[in-house]
Amino acid sequence: MLYALLMMVVVVGVGALMFARTVAEIRHSGDDAAIVQTLLLARGAANMGGQSLQGVVRDELHEIVEARSSTVGRWSFGNDGAGVNSPTPNNNDLVNDLRAVAQELQSAVDAILCSNTTVTPSSGGTGRFTVYFTETACGEPLPAGITLPAGRFVKGNPRSGVDANAEQTYAIPFVMMAEGSLGQYRRNVVLQGEYRFTVGRGSFAKYALFTNVHRTSRNGDEVWFTEDTLFDGPVHTNEFFRFYRNPWFGGKVTSAGCRNPGDTACDGAFDRQGAEFYGEGFIRREDMRPSESNPRYTNRFGTHAPALAEVDWRVNFIALPTNNQDQAAAAQASGIYIGGHVSTLQLYAGNANGDPLVPDGNGGYTTSAAYQYIVVTQQNGTTRRYRFGPDLILYERQGSNWINTGKTFNGVIFVNGRVDRFTGPARQPGNSNDPRRAPPALARFAQVTVAANNDIRITGDLKYEDPPCTGVPTRLANGNVEPATCDNLDAVNVLGVYTQNGSIRIGNNNSDGTLNAPRDVTIHGVLMTGRQRVEVEDYDEGSPRGAVNLLGGIIEYYYGAFGTFNPNNGSQISGYDRRFKYDERMSMGIEPPYFPTVTQDGVQDVVLFSFGQREQVY
């Protein structure tokens, strides 16, 4: 009897313990489910907040910055004196100016978002977000332990002299709190980052690639960026881009998303703010997966995932210039103005005797340039010769003497017509297919812009005596990209080539050999056309000619073709391949003299940077 009673006590005790444990596990499972659900609610609210930061908040920032930015001082924000190359980080003017932007932005954001930041899914619970540009948002202070640093200057150049249109980039920090709640459960996601916005009117030379219409003509062939596309500088179109596989971009990628870009404005709607992915069609930026900063799509054609360092799918329309009056006026004032067509325009760095420099076989030259020489042969056979040294005093050859023209050369050569042959000195005897045998076209101290009304045909190598970079970005076997070597960014020699109405053509497939560029032609300079293309002449005819080795950038109305290739194996059929390296000095304020500038003044683009996020459970 006692034994039976004892066993009953033990069984009841064990049952009670098992029941208690089961209840605890059920409660614990409920806790886990609630925690997961609140995390999903918080992340959903964070996604909603991110869309707001890329949408309505960004629009408000555009208006506020353009209203508050100084367009007459050296700096858009801050007020340091002459001779200072950046606003002092702790300068009160800079801090106060950017604080005023943040405060005005906060007021605008509160008015738009404070009553519209809650997510209430049918499954229960709520999610909400709050965006802080100041210590208080929607009447709520920043949570304890979280601080907002002051706004800051990121990069750019002061406005002074020829740099009056220099662009400057600033940053406004922000904090976004996203909370998910379900009954007694709370989960927070804290995101910290900053808005970076660029203000001013910069030179078109800052682009590695710029197109108004990203086709070969208004209704021409589509242009696709593929795994062979490697751009390491800023890339922009007023239209939209198309991606196949994994093109690589080491600089900022921007597009306006205009359906029908005109000469001076978008003639259609801005309803192409996104990109096209092969096999997926056009995807709006807000619909990109997993995000607009890291789009990735896999289909039967492969994975289409462009490597984007920075991207903005909805920048302002940027109009190309409508005339070349500034360049013509500069040439007439203190440059070289040539009326009518030019048969040959040759630039070369030479010694005091007028001879081109001689390559030493190691990438350098046996002597340094004493002068920059300019030889102009007009269509009537008249030849004029000029030179200048480091002091920029321009001389013209008359008979056997060099006569001082009385000008301090401003670097501009203007041709009121076309240029049939634009070249540097001929390659030295030996292997005529080796661009290393080409003497330099530009002396280490020379800064030149060649501008023309009509077509400019490049028929020879145009090399710097003192190049800032060597090589081009290269994709390795593991898929990574190895950048070019740029260890000479203090170099000052620079060349700009600009035609307002014509095309810039690489000479090819002409019956007259003097109109053709050599194999593997090397071009150091920024090439720009206001209405046409930078292209290879007769790109789809004749035999393959190697590559165009460009150190600089291309700005064009339409995208110019360079060659044709076998789609089955990638082998070259005609024309030239592209081997491009962006001249990084163009993003540092160095530019060809009197090179065209972006016509609009104000905020050029806005980029959202996230420094990370953390989660909290309550």
Image (cartoon, grey):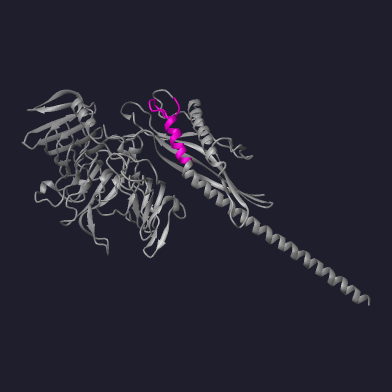
Task: Residue 470: tell me if it is visible.
Answer: no
Q: Is residue 78 above or below residue 255?
A: above
Left or right of 75 in this view: 405: left
Q: Where does the N terminus fall, quadrant-wise? A: bottom right
Residue sitting at the far left: 380
Q: Quadrant of residue 379?
A: top left
Image location (x, y in percent) of residue 343: 10, 39
Task: Residue 72: tell me if it is visible.
Answer: yes
Query: Is residue 571 or residue 110 the one in the foreground?
Result: 110
Query: Is residue 296 or residue 586 the one in the foreground?
Result: 296
Instruction: Give yes or no for residue 78 being in the magenta stretch.
Output: yes
Query: Is residue 112 or residue 220 the one in the foreground?
Result: 112
Q: Is residue 27 above or below residue 238?
A: below
| Boundaries of the magenta span | 57-79
Image location (x, y in percent) of residue 616: 63, 49
Query: Is residue 367 or residue 528 the one in the foreground?
Result: 528
Which residue is painted at 11% across and 50% down in the image?
510
The total number of labels drawn is: 0
